[in-house]
Amino acid sequence: MQINYEKYSEYLLTSPYNYTNTHMADHISDLSHDSVNRFLKWEELSLDLLYSRVYEDIIYSKSGYLLFDDTVLDKDYSHKIELVRRQYSGT
């Protein structure tokens, strides 16, 4: 199976907790995590592409904010923070 923007966007929109290459490959037949990795490494996912997929779901509010953060940082004391779970980061 060949991965593309449409398939990757659908995966992100329907996967509430786990966004790893392996998780995606495990849930889509004939897809390897290496092909997902190559896609993400070489393709550029633009802001316009993301916006075109989610703009109808955004509810605008004067008191609300929409924040995207894809940063993964090592946190030495995260095991002491309530509701934090372990996640593979690759760092």
Image (cartoon, rainbow, N blue to C red):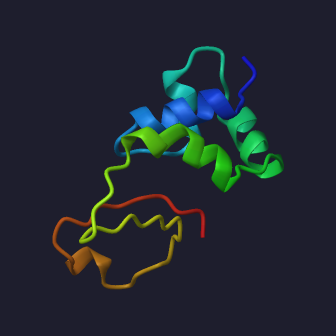
Q: Determine the residue positioned at 35% across, 42% down.
A: 16
Q: Quarter holding the C terminus?
A: bottom right
Residue at x-position 41% and y-position 32%? 14
Q: Position of residue 49 (x, y in %)?
A: 65, 44
Residue 15 visible to an observer of this rendering: yes
Q: Is residue 23 visible?
A: no
Q: Is residue 11 left or right of residue 38?
A: left
Residue 3 x/y as whole percent: 71, 27
Q: Nearer the viewer, residue 86 or 20?
A: 20
User: Splitting the image into 4 quarters, where does residue 25 fall?
Assistant: top right
- The answer to whether 56 appears left or right of 70 in the picture is left
Give whichever of 90, 17 is nearer the camera.
17
Q: Horizontally, is 84 left or right of 28 in the view? A: left
Q: Position of residue 8 (x, y in %)?
A: 60, 34
Looking at the rendered image, the quarter that the N terminus falls into is top right
Residue at image location 57% in from the left, 36% down from the top = 9
Counting every numbered tag in the picture gives 0
* Residue at screen point 52% across, 30% down: 10
Residue 32, how many percent across, how many down?
Answer: 67, 28
Nearer the observer, 70 or 50: 50
